[in-house]
Image (tube, helix red, strand yellow):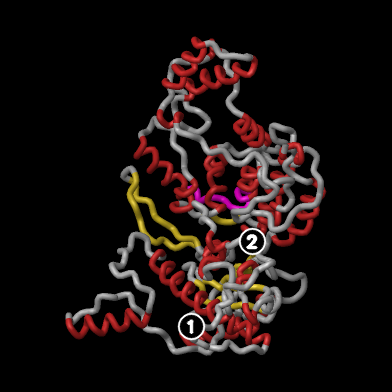
Amino acid sequence: MCFSVAQITKKLAGGAAGTAAWVTNVGNEYGQVLVSVLTAAEGGGLANMAAGLMGRYRVAGKAPPKVLYVDRDCCVTVGQSKTAEMFHEWHELKVRLDVWHLMRRFARGVTTDSHQLYGLFMARLSFAIFEWDDGDVARLTEAKQSEEGRGAHIKLTAKELARHCRRRTRGAAETERLLQEVLDTFWEAVDTMGVPLIDRARMEEIWSTQRRHLDCIQDPAGVELYTQTGELTKGGVRLPVYRCARGSTSLESFHLHLCRFIPGTSASDLHFQVYLLEGLVRWNENRGRAAVEGGQRPALRCFSAQLQHSFNQLTQEFLGRTLVENYTKPREYTGELIGVEYLYSQTGAVLQQDWDPDTPDGTGEAEEDWKDGDEGFEEEEEEPEEIRLLSHHHALLLRPPEPRGAPATAAVAEASTSQSGPKHTPPDEEEDDDVVGPDGHGGYQLVVPLAHALVDLRHRAFIPSRQARDIIALWQKLSDRDKAPVTYPPRHQDRLVKGRFKTTQRRHAHTPGVDSVKR
């Protein structure tokens, strides 16, 4: 279960405008959404939704879930949490806090999200919480070595690690120790301009309040969180493909698409409900197909159950066979309320099913509060934030374990240096052999002379023709990969507007050095 941001509720226009405050979604281990409801208050009034879900499992004869990941209300000092009380029929249910939501709380303690060390800091937090399965990593490394050659420099990409390797939590005590080491390492960390990464006072407050949640993020005992969905062969080695059911990552992706279900910036209650239901059906159909690795793509792409049913009847009558084999007949209505109907059960309003085409849909009304534009038309990110953070894990896996209590300052120094550019190497130390650069690719010995030549231009008021020809010659020696254009991130952002760890509110605290980065 995960509580969505309230941005989607701003699209509800007409007489229902301003009545919804929150959206709550519940998903299963396949990424499908079981229910999506709007509520009049933040996180409140969910008892009927929980009762409907428990009744649905009971009628279907399915075993209740053993673990539920939430973004709040995970634990209390005395008694049961609110979430556990809502699902009181599921006696073996364990409520866990989603790890990425915990990391987002730590992200509030940095001075700026666009800091050079921000990505490394978040990756170190993740590495302190999770540990990779040694056997899976060794098998993937062997496959890459066999494919690229024993002498080649290999790098385990983030997507390969997430697809072929399993992770597990380290335990509350070990996690607390490693998180403290990470914080000790980054307390005084600065970028190349001297801007600190961490606001120490704010981070110390966050750390003191979030310590108690370390037990809430641990993997529950006896619950298998990984499912093997297929296999593939790489370099003669068979690699299993895993799907992870840990956390609410799929629901976070669903929140992005939720805004796209309702086109434009506003919709009346009826149109909002129709768009939401259609989007839920399409989402669940796609997630069901994606749950099987290597499965055949259906020849017919249709989401209408009525059309699929009619098509099957016709093909059975005239051809004697069924073409839509994965068609599932709609079940009997359970009486559960979804979307706007659930909201109206709290406010006492009634959803009028007026199909008059002349009825206004609410899209023409002014939306003064809609300051961020239409999220439904934002470009989707290339990959989830947690996958991008795994790109740092390859270096962390190769680094030998450090003695306890010794801060890992080397990683911070390496990251800061790599952001500032290549080190200056005297000409007599350069070698003619192919040199592997920081990116793991060869040809670095050709990049450094060109970099030196370009840096030397800052001391010259003009460039002679001979020097220009020399620079062009150095450029021509580069490989095609090094000649490709490089897209640099913006030098400064007040706050991230995309990603799992974007800032939800503006920070008002002043940090020395951050303002100078804006200039």
* Circle 2: residue type: Ile
The residue carrying pointer 1 sits among few (fewer than 14), some (14 to 19) or many (20 or more) residues within 10 Å by Cα, namely: few
Question: In which image quadrant can residue 25 be found?
Answer: bottom right
For residue 357, which numbered disc appears in the image? 1
Asked whether, in this view, residue 96 is left or right of residue 505, the answer is left
Q: Quadrant of the C terminus?
A: top right
Query: In whole angstroms, how far apart are the C-alphas of marks 1 and 2?
Result: 50 Å
Span highlighted in magenta in the image: 126-134
The image position of residue 81, as x and y in percent, is 70, 74
Q: Which residue is mark 2?
A: 217
Q: Residue 128 lies in magenta, yes or no? A: yes
Question: In which image quadrant can residue 35 be found?
Answer: bottom right
> Residue, x 54% and y 13% (percent of image)?
429
The image position of residue 28, as x and y in percent, is 51, 71
> Between 121 and 404, which is closer to the camera in this rendering?
121
> Residue, x 67% and y 58% (percent of image)?
102
Q: Earlier in the sequence, mark 1 or mark 2?
A: 2
The image position of residue 74, as x and y in percent, is 68, 69
> Between 379 and 431, which is closer to the camera in this rendering?
379
Q: Quadrant of the N terminus?
A: bottom right
The image position of residue 378, as x and y in percent, is 54, 58
What kind of element bears circle 1?
Answer: loop
